Image (cartoon, coloured by chain):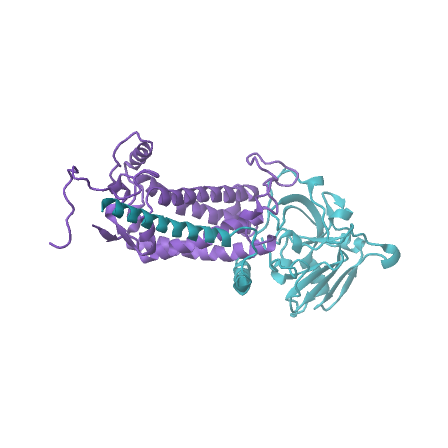
Amino acid sequence: MTNLTKRTHWVVRITHWINVIALPLMVASGLRIFNAYPGFARKGESFCCYPFEGKPIPAALTFGGWLAGARHWHFAVMWVLVVNALVYLGFLYLHGEWRELAPRRGDVRRAWQMIEFYGFAIKEHPHQGKHNALQKAAYFAMPIVAAIIVLSGIAIWKPVQLHWLTMIFGGYVWARYVHFMAMILLVLLVLGHVFMVFAVDPYAMRSMITGWYDEDLAPEARNARPFYHLLPRRRSPGDRSPPAVTGNG
Amino acid sequence: MMTQRVRDERSLIDRRRFLALAATGTVAALVGCDSFGSRRLEPALAAAERGNEKVERLLFRHRSEDRIPGGARLSGNAFPQYYVSDTVPMWDEATSGVWRLEVSGAVRQPLSLGLEDLVKMPRVAQSVDHFCVEGWTARAQWIGVRVSDLARAAGITDDAQYVDFQSFDSDYHESWDMASAMHPQTLVAYAMDGRYLGAGHGAPARVHSPVKLGYKNTKYLTKVVFMPRRNGGYWTDRGYEWYAGT
């Protein structure tokens, strides 16, 4: 009764789980660095666009213990994440899998349909390929946001030697702000992703670990919304769909 | 039969979700929570710091200078005043005699310069950023003498690979790589925003340069010592990175 397909390449699986470990380390050490001066205003000036100026991040969300420790972690783990991202993106390019994530004509409409479906405005799960349109948008956005984080990070690491890069972000203060806000955006994308895995497609965990995915358990096959139809669809005697083909024939 | 199968599947899902949640929770517990991280990974962090220093030295150019927009507001009184001693360090002429700056070490002609000697040397005025390791920045105009001019006046030898900037703020000092010290924006500054340095800003003279983080910019300067080897520094010895270039 299973319909297993090889879905997730080992390169994607390994880079994914490296991210699972390294990204929280990077975020938490960054928050500890931020807490040394939890604001954005240059001395003697004010900053327009951060409502929590001067309020530190709760220590439980930070990592590194103190400013210097957090900086050592931040400046070490950054290489892990950058190399990991380059391996992942290089694989997507060479293996052609970027096609599954690149935006296509009609994706906005399909994404809106997904929102309507999740909001019970549509009864049947919109037809999808490997990912639904919302997933595609999230997975396409993540490397772009990550690239903004890396570039703004370099801009505040080297504001004199790479002055031109810092100026692209509008100077040191704004580069630091972009670095922080893009991190928030990436964290939100990741939290949304993790929530949807548990609420809609926990069976995807199998493919991210072993690579194998049971297409009969895909959200489209289950007509699954968050916390709806988490279990496989049962075939009742009155089910008019054709019986599944077994492998014994 | 049917209910039995469904229950099995549900328990399977629950177990799978439980494992996933447990894994997530473990990661969350390892990360964050104000942790210092594993001690066993410290050699890896030290190796990363050495690698980063190589990258930073490779990126370093004397032509890359910090520029702030013309007419930009300076920080003025908001420029933080800081030191490591318990009270503001003040040069006491009664016990220590007249303040003089010593330029020594790997030089042919050691110098001992009074404040008036410094003022007579070629003068540079620059409005630049000050990048603190904590993440804040401040702007001020500094007047002083280029460290490269001091090096030329003292005649540094081939042994001069590093410079130590020492102070009378307890045992505060920080050593620099030669390239950063010879950057045209690295000054021994004696005036800030058009006035001689105040006690809170490192009087009578301090190092100021936008090419290094604030803590490398020794205040309350007493000695500029050229050396064949680096000798750490106050914050460097306490765990902050030594290079700290911007």
Q: Is residue A192 left or right of residue A217?
A: right
Q: Nearer the viewer, residue A188 or B190?
A: A188
> Which percent across, then down, holds residue B57?
55, 60
Q: Residue furthest left?
A: A249
Quadrant hosting residue B96: bottom right
Please provide percent x and percent y for residue B35: 56, 54
Which color was chain A given?
A: purple
Q: Tell me if A57 is positioned left or right of A218 in this view.
A: right
- Residue B226 screen position, x and y as percent: 69, 65
Judge whether residue B233 can be spotted in this image. yes
Tally the numbered discs. 0
Which chain identifier belongs to the cyan chain? Answer: B
Nearer to the camera, A203 or A40: A203
Placement of the C terminus of chain A among the 4 image quadrants: bottom left
Q: Residue furthest top?
A: A121
At horizontal 62% and vertical 54% (from top left) the residue drawn is B212
Is residue B50 visible in the rendered structure shown here?
A: no
- Residue lying farthest right? B94
Observer-nearest of B118 and B12: B12
Residue B1 lies left or right of residue A54; in this view the side is: left
Q: Is residue A154 above or below residue A228?
A: below
Please state the horizontal and vertical placement of residue A118, each as a whole percent of the image: 33, 34
Q: Is residue A138 above or below residue B173?
A: above
